[in-house]
Amino acid sequence: MRIDVYGHCGELAARRYDPAHVQHYLDTCAIDRLLLANLEAASEPDGAADVDEATANLACLECCRADRRLMPMYWVRLGKTDNNLHALAGALEIEPFVAVFFAPALNGFPADAPELDACVSVAGKLRRPVFFLTGRDEVARPSRVYELARRHRGVSFVLCGAGGDTRWHEAVEVVARAREQEDARLALCTAGAGAEDIIAAAEKVGGDHLLFGSDATRDGDRHAEHVGELLEALRQGLPADVFANLVGENARRRLQVP
């Protein structure tokens, strides 16, 4: 099974979800599952849709119901008046959300904020991984997510968004450190990273700590072509077992994706 752990629905700035592009990508690259979070839950930058948490996540559910290969992640708008811990717990218990998604820079909170502890505890209790969109902003540094992950050692954390960014090497370092010290369960999503960076990261952090993601479909109608080329480069550059783990098996084991 081939699993892409990082995609979006909704709209943010020039980014707009197009079902035709997504279907073409899934079919062309033989993607069996694609995890989605709704960009319209973002409250920043200026012009963001700033849709309330319940409405944004309901829209994500509806989007995923259109294709069994699409799997929803619950976007938490920490600090907003529409953010509700009980609603999060209820949604994870009743609806098919496979993960909890946090975007510190897009919702204006630090990735190690004490207020996150309650949300992460709920995710851990209900056996859901938590995804963090990291980035250049100080509030979204991978090292800050690592600090939070160390407070919740039984919860699986995934770092997204570092690929192709100035924080990629920091993300690799913290995942490697967590593995060596066994003080957090961190994995790194490959979205945005090139083949050379991904292959080097596999050597640094171990192939079982990487999850394939593509930020689907950030490249619009060319996304399938770009990802196909990347997957072929990775297939040639990685041992067969590492490649198989990267593109699907790690997600099945660590994230309990059905």
Image (cartoon, rainbow, N blue to C red):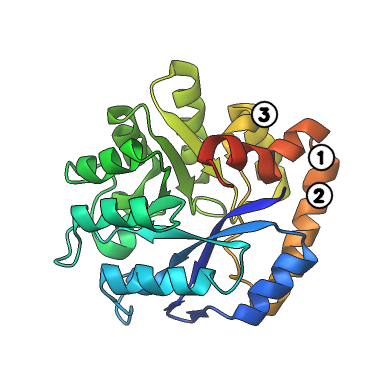
Q: Quadrant of residue 82?
A: bottom left
Q: Quadrant of residue 211?
A: top right
Task: State which tag comes first along the sequence, 3 or 2.
Answer: 3
| Image spot of residue 233 (x, y percent) | 81, 49
Q: Is residue 219 above or below residue 107?
A: below
Q: Is residue 42 left or right of residue 108?
A: right
CB under 8 Å between callouts 1 and 2? yes
Q: Is residue 249 above or below residue 107?
A: above
Residue 73 seen by the camera: yes
- Disc 2 is placed on an element classified as helix
Q: List the single residue furthest toward the top.
A: 181
Q: Is residue 54 above or below residue 244?
A: below
Q: Is residue 144 left or right of residue 204?
A: left
Disc 3: which residue:
203
Residue at the image position 66 percent from the left and 33 percent from the top: 202
- Disc 1 is placed on an element classified as helix
Q: CA distance from mark 1 to mark 2?
A: 6 Å
Q: Which mark is residue 145?
A: none
Disc 2: which residue:
233
Q: Residues within 10 Å of mark 1 (few under 14, many from 20)?
A: some
Residue type, label 2: Ala
Disc 1: which residue:
237
Task: State which tag comes first along the sequence, 1 or 3.
Answer: 3
| Image spot of residue 252 (x, y percent) | 61, 40
Residue type, label 3: Glu
Q: List the single residue furthest toward the right.
A: 236
| Image spot of residue 207 (x, y percent) | 66, 31
Residue at the image position 57 percent from the left and 74 percent from the top: 66
